Image (cartoon, rainbow, N blue to C red):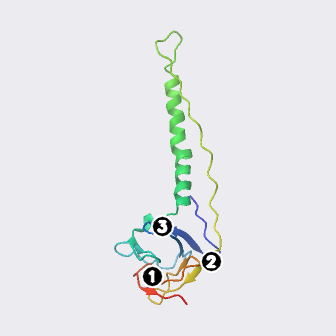
Amino acid sequence: MSIPLDSDGFLRRQCPTCERELKWLVTQDDDAEETPEPEGGFYCAYCAVQAPGGEWHTEAQVELAKSILLQQFVEPQLEDFSRNLQRLNRPGGLISVSVEHEKSEPADPLTETDDMKRVDFECHPETPVKVLDDWAREVHCPICGAAVELN
């Protein structure tokens, strides 16, 4: 599954606690050392609550993943099951089986806009975030939770 980045290389995420969206910088350089996930997970830029890295998907990202799973795995299994049940139908047999299911429509691919304002941290300069344009309160570092005031 492909999740697009904005033109600055940031990936849209959503805090599992406060549910606000933010963006994390994705490093494309294979030689760059990735910052390991902190014990307890990453801190939310808004509410400073920690959560493991796998819990930060947006609702749109989750819906796309569900759609892909349904189309590529569940529906083919249902079709196989239906064909196997149809084999039970014999002329003059005691039972007759029919199975119907609707195929799902493919989900629209994700797109990414160049929104939000960038915030850099002195404590971890390699991990900037982008926050909502109208956010005027402090912003927390995703690695250590340190707060910075916005200008």
Answer with mark 2 or mark 1, whichever residue precedes in sequence.
Answer: 2
Relative depth, front residue between 51 and 137: 137
Q: Residues within 10 Å of mark 3 (few under 14, many from 20)?
A: some
Q: Quadrant of the C terminus?
A: bottom right
Q: CA distance from mark 2 to mark 1?
A: 19 Å
Q: Residue 46 location, x and y as percent?
A: 47, 77
Instruction: Please state which amino acid type lies under the numbered disc 3.
Output: Glu
Mark 3 against mark 2, which lies toward the viewer? Answer: 3
> Label 2 sits on what residue type?
Asp
Q: Residue at x 39, y 74 (%)?
A: 49
Dot 3 falls on a residue whose secondary structure is loop
The numbered mark, 3 or 1, whose residue comes first in the sequence reads: 3
In the rendered structure, find residue 65 and report the number of the disc placed on it.
Answer: none
77 or 94, nearer to the observer: 94
Q: Which residue is mark 2?
A: 8
User: What residue type is disc 1 on?
Assistant: Cys
- What residue sits 40% from the left and 81% below the top? 145
Q: Which mark is on residue 19?
A: 3
Quarter residue 12 falls in:
bottom right
Sooner in the amino-acid sequence: mark 3 or mark 2: 2
Q: Count the numbered circles shown.
A: 3
Q: Report how far apart the C-alphas of labels 3 and 2 lie in the structure.
A: 23 Å
> Residue 82: x, y in percent?
52, 30
Cβ–Cβ under 8 Å for marks 3 and 2: no
- The numbered mark at residue 141 is 1
SS category of the residue bearing label 1: loop
Could you tell me which secondary element the residue under label 2 belongs to? Answer: loop
